[in-house]
Image (tube, rainbow, N blue to C red):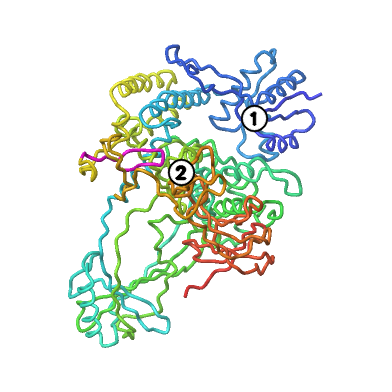
Amino acid sequence: MSKHLVIVESPAKAKTIKKYLGADFEVLASYGHVRDLPAKKGSVNPEDHFAMKYETIEKNAKHVAAIASALKAADSLYLATDPDREGEAISWHVCELMKGKLKNKPVHRVVFHEITQKSVKEAITNPREISMELVNAQQARRALDYLVGFNLSPLLWKKVRRGLSAGRVQSPALRLIVEREEEIERFQTREYWTITAHIAQPKAFTAKLTYYQGKKQEQFSLTDEASAKAVEKHLTQIAEGVLRVIKVEKKQRKRQPAPPFTTSTLQQEAARKLGFPTRKTMMIAQQLYEGIDIGSGTVGLITYMRTDSLNLAAEAVSEIRQFIDKSFGSHSLPEQPRIYKTKSKNAQEAHEAIRPTAVFQTPTMIKSHLSADQFKLYDLIWKRAVACQMIHALIDTVAADLACGPGNDNLFRANGSTIAQPGFIAVYQEGKDDAQEDDSDDKQLPEIHEGEIVPLNQILSEQHFTEPPPRFSEASLVKALEEFGIGRPSTYASIIHTLQHREYAVLENKRFIPTDVGRIVNHFLTEYFTRYVDYGFTANLEDELDAISRGEKEWIPVLNEFWNPFITQVGTIDKTVQRKDVTTETLDQQCPKCGKPVAIRLGKKGRFIGCTGFPDCDYTANLDGEETSSAQPEEVLDRTCPQCGGKLYIRQGRYGRFIGCSQYPKCKFIEPLEKPNDTQIACPECHQGTLVEKKSRRYGKIFYGCNRYPDCNYAIWNPPINEPCPKCAWPILTLKETKRRGKEKVCPRKECGFSEQIAEE
């Protein structure tokens, strides 16, 4: 008979821990949360000190019953859920549900930050009580999210459209995306020109014009082609085929390694380097944390992946330094271990940063036991952890000034750098965001000396245009959320998923674009609930939740302080604001049909321009001003419906124009107006159809699928290439293009992994 019952969240975690604890312990999974607030009014009662009416989650009722049954035969209960607020709350909910079954049996709360035999056994021998400070912080968060959702969402239904939702942290995140889009739309492109000298050394290099006729060249010194060409011609004439090196500056700088991963930096880097969405990153990290069978048994490969701490255990640092010494030599070690301090005042330093549980367990050693995605993420975490304890890199930088013509009034500057000592770069380099893409570390200059005459190939002027700030990617959005203090690292993935699921924003080319509905919702919230989508207010509320978790504040007063002004504002807006105030934007234009003002309105298919005289006037146009309304849809004159013989019309649907029967809904015949683009490449799955270009329904993203669908459902995201894979002989390859690697041929079979870069012409 088992003497002790241990509760964890997941069956994978239960399986791993059971092997460590032996026969005296029974380990069961709660399968996540066991209780939650039911989705109905009154689950939180502000009038009764925010009393919360929890119910057992229906899908987990059988797991709760299994725990209750096992508890009868156990002498004690160990609650070993995750070491954070959420995990603490799950332990408390389990304990509350088991109150009638415990019968004075001892209850222990145990926490560990890595699932290894040593850590688990140490936790079991050093239990503590449930922390009600952490539980109440989670309860306060849940109550706030419930109160906002159940009071603001119905208001959105009345003022905008049914089925919408507003969230305490999702709304400020949506504001970030919409404001960035509006900033892009307001952006005024400016033209400018640069002058570059191309030097014909044995190793060619380029230099940029920095001074012309003694005047420093700024970004907008040359703004038109005529001026740029005149400068180009003048410099070419006076150069007489050479430039003079008048100054060479050589410096050496240190580059320090990036700290180990926190949740947010892992999500950012996995998005940059691996192309993983945040949800995928967290899902795979969870698998690595809970345990993988690596041949010698199931073991947790990384420490807990929900953390904002940069701290590393002294034992782990010692092991990493031993590995570096053995693998790279003592010269790759700094004299003292590197200690990283978290800037966030709310970071839980008792936690560790994300690291491998055993650094001598290299990614290549266990690659055969991991899926392709598990290996990629483990490799990323392992390399970052090792690199963070290595010596700095030394970069030799060179800057040379070259004079053109007599005197020193016309100067070009060439910059370059080389890695003198790779240090940590031998293992890992941090990825870059958009604004950091231009880096000269890989641009080398040949050995040149002051007074040297170098041969000039040509001087060229080049046109440029200023660009607006880039739209948010998942990586840059996570970074912005962290900088503004919106949500916490463990919530970023769910925030991003909610924005997409509600169709407030779509991902296009891995960039977030707000939908029309997303814009309307954001404008409604920012105009009428300014305080609650304010970045500072949201961040301060997170700080108060953290203060509750530290025992510095009581949770009921915090809820009261939020609730009273919030519900007053909801009531005021409900009474004073009409739907047309939210969804209609009157323009300074007149209807071409009746002369009344026109306005931007929100319809089922998004925003459009419509006459304010509707329904007397049916004029409508898209946002570009192209008229879309007509008394009758356009009739297809040379055909009739093949199913019922009725007339056919060209109609506009959610996914574009199509041909439909006039007898709809009695007859539901439809066909696309434009035939899909056929690649004429045979489907590699069925060998009968061909791959055609299609558009996904949810986000409108282009993909390529078999034209025999639904008989054959083969589909790929990247454009197909009619060449067999040289590695696995799959009939096709695909064309993939990224900023980091450029264009490459890639096998669409993940298990193959073949890729080959395409040389630029």
Residue 740 spot, x, y in % from top left: 48, 62
Q: Nearer the viewer, mark 2 or mark 1?
A: 1
Q: Is the magenta stretch mostly helix, strand or loop?
A: strand
- Residue drawn 70% across and 16% down? 105
Residue 653 spot, x, y in % from top left: 45, 45
Side of 230 where 396 appears, left or right? right
The Cα atoms of the two marked residues, 2 and 1, are separated by 28 Å
Instruction: In the rendered structure, find residue 371 and report the number of the disc placed on it.
Output: none
Indicate which disc, 2 or 1, sits on the residue closer to the N terminus.
1
Q: Is residue 261 visible?
A: no
- Residue 441 picture quarter: bottom left
Foreground pick, 649 / 164: 649
- Residue drawn 30% across and 40% down? 610
Residue 411 spot, x, y in % from top left: 25, 75
Residue 185 spot, x, y in % from top left: 30, 50
Q: Does 561 lie within the magenta span?
A: no
Instruction: In the rendered structure, find residue 341 and report the number of the disc placed on it.
Output: 2
| Type of the residue with mark 1 | Ala
641 shown above or below 518: below
Q: What element carries label 2?
A: loop
From the image, tell me which residue sits under label 1: 80
- Residue drawn 26% across and 55% down? 188
Side of 337 where 375 appears, left or right? right
| Type of the residue with mark 2 | Lys
Q: What stretch is highlighted in magenta?
A: 596-609
Side of 673 where 214 appears, left or right? left
- Residue drawn 41% across and 23% down? 151
